[in-house]
Structure formats: C-alpha cells, structure tokens
Image (tube, rainbow, N blue to C red):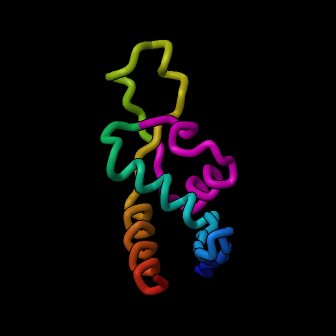
Amino acid sequence: MRVNIKMSIIQKPGGKNITIRHVTIYDAIYKSLNLINTKITHPITLSKISNNPNVQKILLAKGLIREVKPKENLISEYQNYKYFVIAPKGHEYIKRFEKLRELVE
C-alpha cells in the first residue's frame, strides 16, 4: 500500500511557520475504523461510520468491516437497515497505519 502524506508550511504574518497536515483517504479510513474500534461497542449503520462514499466503498470492498444482523435487539422498524462491525482485517489496518505513522513522524 502506498501512502501519500501531504504537508505544507504556511508562514503567518508574525513570522511563525505552521505545518499543516492534509488528510488523505488513508487517514479517513483509519479515522472511521478507529471510531468503531474504540468508541462504539454495538453495531452501527454505514452512514454513521463515514459520510464519505469513497471511504464506505473501500471499507466494504477490502473487507475492513463486516455486516451483522442484531435483529433480536431492534424494533421492527429498524430491521431493514444493515449494521456493521469492524472485521479482523480492520484491526490489522489500524495496527499497520499506526506503525507507519510512527515511522513517518
């Protein structure tokens, strides 16, 4: 996997240089997976994982999340939606991304 980390240095009027890190698609995928992994313990819908359709497609195509059917806990009006949890490949992605970030920074 190729990772492009884009950074730019902006000079403020006072003479201070500020480094800004631009968000790439890999950062967006990591952020979505990390949200599921750390803060959410129950299955959630795809739109709550990420609003970016490209990120949603990548998460599903690469098998980073998997669909579950928690129908016993849901009211009948919510049974038509698909719910997702993080897959083992998603855990691997998080570990690799964090190691790569440590190397780059």
Judged from this view, the residue extending furthest toward the top is: 76
Residue 40, image x, y percentages: 35, 42
Could you tell me residue 86's position as x and y percent?
41, 52
Q: Residue at x 38, y 61 (%)?
A: 88
Identify the residue shown where x is 42% and y is 75%: 96
Q: In the image, is residue 45 part of the stretch drawn in magenta?
A: yes
Give yes or no for residue 72 being in the magenta stretch.
no
Given residues 102 and 46, the one toward you in this image is: 102
Q: Residue 56, percent across and down?
A: 61, 50
Q: Is 58 on the left-hand or right-hand side of 92?
A: right
**Above or below for 78 versus 48:** above
Q: Residue 6's spot in the image, x, y percent?
A: 65, 76
Position of 76 relative to 3 (above/below):
above
Residue drawn at 40 percent across, 48 percent down = 36
Q: How many numbered marks, from 0 up?
A: 0
Q: Quadrant of residue 75?
A: top left
Pick the quarter of the image with the N terminus. bottom right
Between 76 and 19, the residue placed more toward the observer is 19
> Does 82 appear above or below 31?
above
Query: Magenta segment, which residues?
Result: 44-67
Residue closest to the eye, 30 or 88: 30
| Viewer-side residue, 19 vs 13 | 13
